[in-house]
Amino acid sequence: MIRTVLVVDDSDTVRRMLRWVLSPLGLRILEAPNGALALETLDRETVHLVVADLNMPVMDGIELVRAIRAVPARAALPVIMLTTEQRELDVESAIKAGANLYLTKPSTPAVIREKILSLLDGTEAKA
Amino acid sequence: MTTGTLHRAAALREIASPDAAERGRAARQLARWDDVDVVKALAAALTDADRGVCDAAASSLLMIGTANTVEFLLPLLRSDHPGTRNRAGSLLEQLGKAEPRALIRLSSDPDPRMRLFAANIIAGTGDHDLAPRLIELMKDADVNVQDAAVVGLGRMRASSAVPALRDRLRASDPWACFSTIDALGTIGSPEALRALLDGAQAADPQMRSAYIDAAAATGLPEAAAGLLDLLSRFIDAGPLVAKALLGPLAHTLADPRFNTPGLAALLADGLARATPEDILRALSAPELPIRAAAIEAARVRAIPEAAPALSRLRSDPDSKIRTAAGTALNAFERTRKERL
């Protein structure tokens, strides 16, 4: 089964970068430029993991995670926050909202791939 | 004007109402004034718990659009709430041209988060007069600020930044290198393409794929020839070059110099894993090498839905296409008979 990762970021460059970073893993990659469009994608596609930015227009990353966790069927959907925001306040908000992991940029391609595979395989402990 | 003053005073009272509908109405009405008290009240309303009030305040601030609007929005970038930060950032991208000095000041803030916002906002203004400041920010002490400046120069399509970006291609950090490659691809000038094609020569295969995608994104006619030259040195780049030639660079293949059997074979390989729909589309492509490749891919894959398009191609203006289409149809017919 080909697993699907939804990349949510308002930066075209970051979405292209993550597509490039994940290309060796043979995953199907979907993209959304904000939280609201990510939720629409989740309604129509089977997604196995979400990688989301924190600062985005329309609906930010924290709101997105809350909306994901508000749907019982998505309670276990792994969500990684990938952001430049490094303050403890933002980390705590994201984890409290239900994010599984909080990664700060810049992160190496190897680390991103490893974390994504771990969460997809269910071997990554929460936060 | 007395009536205006009255309305203004009432609206300033109403924007603090416990009722969200009243606050929203007040936020909309306040767009008619541009004094400091009004702008201050509207900026404060951007932190309202009700999204409708925030949206109304944002619309009014955009309509006012004065320099003091920019000054009142800047502190909101320090908010603890991502929604408020993002809303302020989006507004500043649209209003920043009214007070560029404020953005320059923000770009020297001691907090790297503010400098990062500054780089994003400057890029969002699209004001090329501010590109030199982004080029300076490429040497910021914080790597995320550097990166935001690079991405911003790409967004602005700042061709003046190509020499500085070319130097940054030597960065050992893959994240920094990718964002630089991507920025050059977005700028898309002939000089940017040259930097990409040169950089691809020394890159490892994974990074080379980013160079190829970025060179393709320029859409320049010289990109196709450059990628084919690259392919002559790095044969493993075949699938990526074929993808580029069938995608963003397809239009460049109308040039007769590309009507070669070698290119058709490369493109046919590229189509080997494409969906039948992609192959059917390629059969109608205006570019001769793509039609030739699609005929070959349809023949090898024995796609029955391709038969009508192949029949049409028997009347193609190019004799090689007519012959190839006939050969493919004959192969289809042989396969059909064998199955019977």
Image (tube, rainbow, N blue to C red):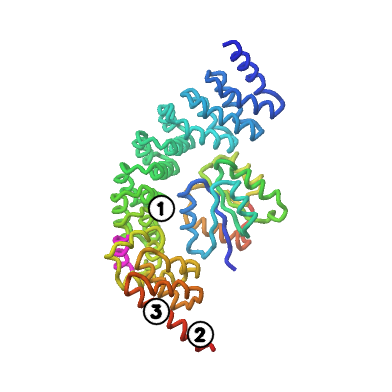
Question: In the image, which is nearer the foreground, mark 2 or mark 1?
Answer: 2
Q: Quadrant of the C terminus of chain B?
A: bottom right
* Label pair 2/1, CB-CB below 8 angstroms: no
Task: Give me the chain letter of mark 2.
Answer: B
Q: Which mark is residue B178?
A: 1
Q: Which mark is residue B326?
A: 3
- Residue at 67% from the left image edge and 21% from the top image edge: B14
Count up the numbered dots: 3
B27 and B105: which is toward the camera? B27
Q: Sort mark 3 into few (<14), some (14-19) or many (20+) by Cα contacts within 10 Å.
A: some
Task: Give me the chain letter of mark 3.
Answer: B
Stretch in magenta? B224-234
Q: Is residue B204 left or right of residue A53?
A: left
Q: Is residue B229 magenta?
A: yes
**Secondary-structure class at tag 2:** helix
Q: A111 above or below B140?
A: below
A11 and B148: which is toward the camera? A11
Mark 2 sits on what residue? Answer: B336
Residue B325 percent coordinates (x, y): 39, 76
Residue B177 percent coordinates (x, y): 39, 52
Q: Is residue B56 left or right of residue B70?
A: right
